[in-house]
Image: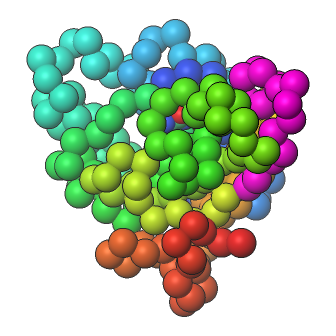
Amino acid sequence: MKSIVVLISGSGSNLQAIIDACNSGAIPGKVNAVIANKADAYGLVRASEAGISTQVLSHKAYQDRDSYDLALIDAIDQYQPDLVVLAGFMRILTPAFVQHYSGRLLNIHPSLLPKYQGLNTYQRAIDAKDTEHGCSVHFVTEQLDGGPVILQAKVPLFSDDDVASLAERVHEQEHQIYPLVVRWFCQNRLQQRADQAWLDGNVLAANGYA
Ligand code: GAR
């Protein structure tokens, strides 16, 4: 049974999908702690309701990114995680943090990476008149939203979509692919080797498992 720590900043719907998959046995792991940088993150309520330890570590209490990330490492390592999952954790992480969890740090991003790294991905896709959008799960490296992609899901983008309708369609897919990737990791099927993601001994294509 793998030990998982999840970091959040907001609603925690991806956290919920992962908790549910642990509870159903689909993921051979347990979320041992949920840590948020914001006290009002609704995901903290979800975690408490699931009987999971929670902690708020506000970045506002720290002078700089380095000291915050060191405190975050201390908080996370109390739970001796095999895997650290970023689920809507809206912070840029320092190289020291990323290196500390190298190979066991996952993120989900609301775009078909490498397209639309950074923020406001839905609005950017709508403005560009794209006909499809999606989400990507990737290993985290020092390059922001640039680590090796493991799995992506595509959705159609319709001409009458707004951010809310597109986000809803993407979220549905996120809740499918993130638990699946966490399952693979906890089954020891998934690895990061340098700048590549490997599943069952096969390297995944640059834009993930198709
Ligand atoms: C998710 O859509 C995730 O892709 C996004 O935050 C949302 C969190 O939702 N992450 C990022 O934008 C990271 N750059 P949730 O709190 O309901 O899981």
Provide the residue span drawn in magenta. 153-167
Which residue is found at the position 56% from the left and 88% from the top? 202
Q: Is residue 198 magenta?
A: no
Which residue is found at the position 26% from the left and 12% from the top? 60
x and y percentages locating residue 142 in the rendered image: 28, 53
Which residue is found at the position 87% from the left and 25% from the top? 160
x and y percentages locating residue 96 in the rendered image: 17, 49
Whether residue 52 appears in this view of the structure is no
> Where does the N terminus fall, quadrant-wise?
bottom right
Vertical arrangement, residue 53 with respect to residue 173, above or below: above
| Badge count | 0
x and y percentages locating residue 126 in the rendered image: 70, 30
Q: Nearer the viewer, residue 32 or 117?
A: 117
Instruction: Find residue 167 and report its image quarter.
Output: top right
> Where does the C terminus fall, quadrant-wise?
bottom right
Taking 168 as reference, is 106 left or right?
Answer: left
x and y percentages locating residue 90 in the rendered image: 44, 29
Quadrant field for ligand 1: top right
Vertical arrangement, residue 163 with respect to residue 78, above or below: above
Whether residue 96 appears in this view of the structure is yes
Which residue is found at the position 22% from the left and 42% from the top? 94
Q: Nearer the viewer, residue 101 or 143?
A: 143
Vertical arrangement, residue 15 with respect to residue 209, above or below: above
Taking 152 as reference, is 197 left or right?
Answer: left
